[in-house]
Amino acid sequence: MVRVWLFFSATVLGLVAIAWANDVVTLQGERTVYTAGCERGAWQGMHCTGTMVAAQRYRFRALQPHREVVFWTVGSTEPSGKFTDCTVDDGRNWSCRPSADAARAVTRAMAHGSPVPDAASLALPFRPVTKWHWMLLRYGLSLGSDANG
């Protein structure tokens, strides 16, 4: 019985860790976009000719009843921004019309939890990476030179 309990506990813990590392589980319906930078080189599409490093994290919180999305750069003292004319299905699926704050965000829409490129080029350019890839980059461990959005 103890072995079954240990196996079950280890399995559940493993699944929770995988969900957390892939940002399937988020707090308060927030979604974070992890980005990579390219030091001592330049971006060629999603390929860095230098050294890829962890860059900014952009957090979004969709407020469905208000048809708003609030966003901020994690760790920055810059004030948060807000989109007010949005269609919000949930925290992972929303889209917003352009606003004055659009130039401070990396996207104006999320689909299935992933940022949608801004066709109007109003948002900041960025190279997305997964949460676990960003964490490795943060500690100086590189898995290559390609952002993997």
Image (cartoon, grey):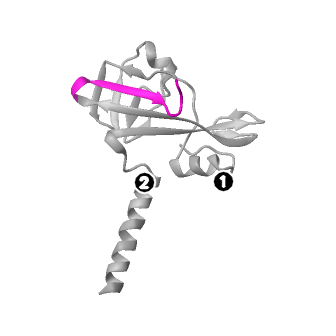
Q: Residue at x 35, y 23 (%)?
A: 96
Magenta-colored stretch includes residue 68: yes
Between discs 2 and 1, the one toward the N terminus? 2
Given residues 145 and 6, the one toward you in this image is 6
Residue carrying label 1 = 143
The relative height of residue 63 versus residue 49 in the rendered view (above or below) is above
Instruction: Identify the residue at the far front of this view.
Output: 77
Crowd around label 1: few <14 · some 14–19 · many ≥20 (10 Å): few
Res 16 → quadrant: bottom left
Residue shown at 38%/71% (left/top)?
A: 11
Left or right of 68 on screen, residue 143: right
Q: Label 2 neighbourhood size at 10 Å, few (<14), some (14-19), many (20+)? A: some
Q: Secondary structure at mark 2?
A: helix
Q: How many marks?
A: 2
Please tell me whether mark 1 sits on a helix, a strand or a loop. Answer: loop
Q: CA distance from mark 2 to mark 1?
A: 20 Å
Residue found farthest to the top: 100
Of marks 2 and 1, the one in the foreground: 2
Q: Nearer the viewer, residue 62 or 127?
A: 62
The image's mark for residue 20 is: 2
The stretch drawn in magenta includes residue 126? no
Question: Front-most of 13 and 131?
Answer: 13
Find the magenta span and give its range.
65-77
Quarter in which the N terminus is drawn: bottom left
